[in-house]
Amino acid sequence: MAFDLESLAEATSGAFGALVSTSILYPLDTCKTKYQAEVKAHHQQKYRSTSAVLWEAIANGQVLSLYQGLGTKNLQAFISQFIYFYGYSFFKKLYLEKTGNKSIGTKANLIVGVAAGACTVIITQPLDTAASRMQTSEFGMSKGLWKMLSESSWSEAFDALDISLLLTTNPSIQYTSFDQLKQRLLKRQLREKTATDSSPQSLSAFSAFVLGAVAKCIATFVTYPAIRCKVTIQAADSDDTDETKEAESKRKKTIIGAIYSIWKREGLLGFYKGIEAQILKTVLSSALLLMIKEKISKATWVLLLALRRYLFTVQPRLKSA
């Protein structure tokens, strides 16, 4: 397949959208991640809520520490969104060319999305792990990206890769939930419809927005236990050198160990600790990313066309010279 300029434009605009969105919401993301990473009995918890992390940073004069790991997170967000949007657009065009269809069906669309997500996760997992460890380090004690990666083995760099791959199904759950809610709402509208009204049924913009938000919340609720386990596995290790705690920390680095640790210390509700902040961050992030992407998509397309025209004009001149 020839070089795909349209896919490149989609990827570039999506990546810049992720960059801005991540930077704006990063303090919320840090507070959420530190709160999720703490696995202790209720009476031993340092943080009783996500806001407690924020107040600690303010009280200690370390507000800027809420941005520790921002560079790594931005790098991870930019690369992951670029790969995802490019892969999604590329696989979609490839599917349409191979099948000869003019549009892509629901099932095929979900498969394409999962495939693009899986490619993204495999490539960016070390950056994701490093960013999580920086965020969960003690305020002011975070290490740099290079030091973080150099001190970790390859297996540690890919901590929770299996959970990350599992979480690529989140959009599928969201889309399925949206479709089911949409069908129920349309059936209800059809029953209330008068016999003389023959106009086709469709959702209003407000209804679509509300159903989209509800569907995203459902998908987050279903997958949240996996998200919580992923954070505890990727969290920075404590500086405590006690052998018992060190052995327990190693057990937490596996899925079974993370599940056991949360269940033992926090019970069933522990798997949903911090879900409010997760939903808030997820909804705001998705809205910001897509809004920014749409705003700069046209400009990105124009710039890439101009760049291609320039390159095709300069190359013949260089060869002739």
Image: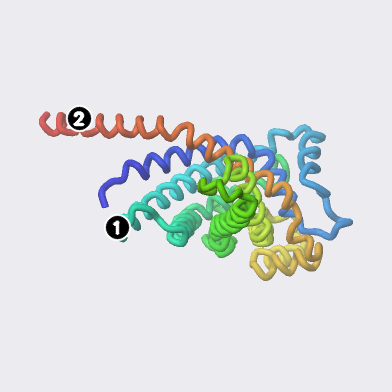
* SS at badge 1: loop
Q: Which residue is outermost to the left?
A: 320
Question: Which residue is found at the position 27% from the left and 34% from the top?
Answer: 308
How does the figure colour the protein chain or chains? Answer: rainbow
> Does residue 215 appear in this view?
no
Side (left or right) of 172 relative to 86? right
Label drawn at residue 224: none
Question: Which residue is found at the position 68% from the left and 49% from the top?
Answer: 278
- Which kind of residue does numbered mark 2 sit on? Thr
> Does residue 221 appear in this view?
yes
Where residue 149 appears, x then y in whole percent? Answer: 54, 52
Sooner in the amino-acid sequence: mark 1 or mark 2: 1
Where residue 245 appears, x then y in whole percent? Answer: 76, 63
Q: Quadrant of residue 219?
A: bottom right
158 vs 180, nearest the viewer: 180
Dot 2 alpha-carbon crowd within 10 angstroms: few under 14, some 14 to 19, many 20 or more: few
The answer to whether 151 is drawn above or below residue 288 in the figure is below
Label drawn at residue 313: 2
Question: Which residue is found at the position 68% from the left and 48% from the top?
Answer: 279
Where residue 229 appears, x then y in whole percent? Answer: 67, 61
> How far apart in space, not on screen, are marks 1 and 2 (Cα)?
34 Å
225 vs 37, nearest the viewer: 225
Side (left or right) of 185 relative to 100? right
Quadrant of the drawing holding the C terminus: top left
Dot 1 alpha-carbon crowd within 10 angstroms: few under 14, some 14 to 19, many 20 or more: few
**Tag 1 residue:** 100
Question: Which residue is found at the position 62% from the left and 57% from the top?
Answer: 184
Side (left or right) of 187 relative to 304? right
- Which kind of residue does numbered mark 1 sit on? Gly
The answer to whether 81 is drawn above or below residue 119 in the figure is above
